Amino acid sequence: MEKWEDNKAWFLVLPAFVIVAFSGIIPLMTVVNYSLQDIFGPGQAVFVGTEWFKEMLSNHRLHDALWRQFIFSGLVLLIEIPLGIIIALAMPKRGWGVSASLVILALPLVIPWNVIGTIWIIFTRPDIGLFGVGINSLDLLEVPFDHTAKPIYAWITLLAMEVWHWTPLVALLAYAGLRAIPEAYYQAAKIDGASPWATFVYIQLPKMRGVLTIAVLLRWMDSFLIYAEPFALTGGGPGNTTTFLSIYLVKLATMQFDLGPAAAFSIIYFLIVLLFSFAFYQALLNVGRGDKA
Amino acid sequence: MARIELNEIAHSYRPKPASESDFALKRIHHMWEDGGAYALLGPSGCGKTTLLNIISGLLTPTRGKILYDGEDVTDLPPEKRNIAQVFQFPVLYDTMTVFDNLAFPLRNRGHDSADVDRRVHEVAEILELTPYLKKRAAGLAADAKQKISLGRGLVRSDVAAILFDEPLTVIDPHLKWNLRRKLKDIHEQLKLTFVYVTHDQVEALTFADKVVVMYEGEIVQIGSPQDLFENPEHTFVGYFIGSPGMNFLDCTLEGDVARCNGARIRIDDAVAAKGRGIQGKLELGIRPMHLKLSSEAVEGGVPADVRGIEDQGSCRIVKVALAGKTLRARLPEGASIPEGQAWLVFPPAWTRLFADGRLVK
């Protein structure tokens, strides 16, 4: 084939480049720009180098928020992944039950974040909420249940919200993974005399590796970026006990107008999510692979 | 080791089968002798796999009984029957090593580790898998994977029969031959009952001592490869076995002459005598290799038109139009081929008469 004289084909990449520039590169560079300057007002900015990064990395409120965030996301993964797998295993495999359970599972997924927050606030309210009134009438708790009363109550409410909202996604992914396993595997396992547990560990779990990797990544990233639920519930309280990274970031940027530190914080935040997603991806891709020595 | 007996088996995938056509298996009554190498041959959808799954216990038949050495096992689950099955696609436990894969059926049955170790090494030796024992099964080639699937059946010393469900489908052509050879060796060495499902006649004919041909949920013929070729008992066997398959012509009988749309073909006296007593659709069948072709009028020859020639290297297939049908004659390489008009000779010894699909004999 004859080679082209010029490189006009590069123009075909231009639309994609423009879109990516406006959606990703330019906003990101704006943040990078802010993070390196101290801005007093419009047109009054001083270049400060890595000053804000140093300040942010040693900021103990950020450290606290980060630990809270890790514990929260860790709990979310620990609850949602096994629970999603259990639901997927229990779902019917044929007949009308399949469509029925898929629709019921998908319901929480189509409800907006803020609405979820409102639903759960009302559900857990100690004066009118079904759960709040119900648990308090049992008179088991030392301090009556109220999500603003004790940090643990706020956490329980948040976790319940998050689990209720997103476990269906894990279950749907796991179900798709299970349905894709050819019947012959189960038949072979039967003939080999495998117990249901062995069938799960040696057939179902390995075959779900791909979808579970996606589930872990999605739930990790999403729960790490959680904002709307704690904002709607207590706005980060009681005290700072549910002030997660994005809540703190928004306080910093839009309430105190510390644009420089907030920008530096954003970049650190972004890098943490990226780093952990990469680590999870590599770990899940390689677990159980390679030869035994 | 066991003799497997299928007693009036019928199976339908519908919960309440009403008519004959609801049955995937119509009526199977057959005995698999201990230590035999059987091939179950038939087109896709004829019920081969259904029958195999009934033998292994993955399916419970709608009607009938299965006996292993005279003992009724119809209601026993697969793990309680001494049976192993190799599937179309290699089924492996991906996260395990080859050793663990082979040991899996034994460990599930609570064998002690010394016994497991001994059996796995024995089987690995037979299957030439010893160098791979410590490797992960997932990384191996398709033929090695299929050997592991087979090995999981062989490790169980109590295994009565091994069922193969088109096991060579995903194997490269040049390895197919090796693996088939290996299967035959193993059969001779271990004297286990092998039942091998396939729709490939070459595979069936080379592998098995006895070929069971199935068609639309029924066994139409059981016989040695030679039997099937020379004495097909059903038009389907004639059509399915051989390449190209048997030629068929609709006919009526007049004395010992068959009339096919005007053409008169002499057939065997005894066959004709029996055929005259039968009501139903009559057909003449002849193998392409037995059909003689002559360029001039000969005694007993039927005039026909030559329509085309396919060169197959070692032989040539001549297409001939007779009585509105196209027949195929197989001529050796170098034989002279008439052009245009030709005369077909049907040697009575090789001309078969079928009534409603069944051989008249």
Image (spheres, coloured by chain):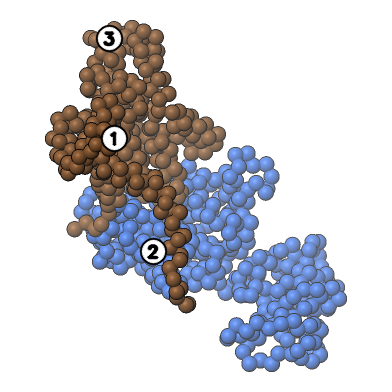
Chain colours: A brown, B blue
Q: Amino acid at mark 2?
A: Ala
Where is residue A50 shown, x and y percent of the image? 16, 43
Q: Are marks 1 and 2 in contact (CB under 8 Å)?
A: no
- Given this view, does label 2 or label 3 mark the residue nearer the observer? 3
Residue sitting at x 32%, y 60%: B139
Where is residue A212 shown, x and y percent of the image? 35, 43
What whole-number distance in Å separates the C-alpha atoms at marks 1 and 2?
Answer: 68 Å
Q: Is residue A248 above or below residue B22?
A: above
The answer to whether residue B19 is seen in the rendering is yes
What whole-number distance in Å separates the C-alpha atoms at marks 2 and 3?
Answer: 64 Å
Q: Secondary structure at mark 1?
A: loop
Label 2 lies in what chain?
A: B
Residue sitting at x 51%, y 50%: B54
Residue sitting at x 45%, y 47%: A180
In the image, B356 versus A215, the foreground residue is A215
Q: Is residue B276 above or below residue A223?
A: below
- Lower sequence index among marks 3 and 1: 1
Q: Secondary structure at mark 2?
A: helix
Q: Amino acid at mark 1?
A: Pro
The residue at which mark 1 appears reads as A42
Where is residue A247 shown, x and y percent of the image? 28, 28
The residue at which mark 2 appears reads as B142
Label 3 lies in what chain?
A: A
In the image, A290 versus B150, the foreground residue is A290
The residue at which mark 3 appears reads as A144
Label 1 lies in what chain?
A: A
- Given this view, does label 3 or label 1 mark the residue nearer the observer? 1
Assess disc 3: are there few (<14), some (14-19) or many (≥20) residues with their C-alpha within 10 Å of its C-alpha.
some
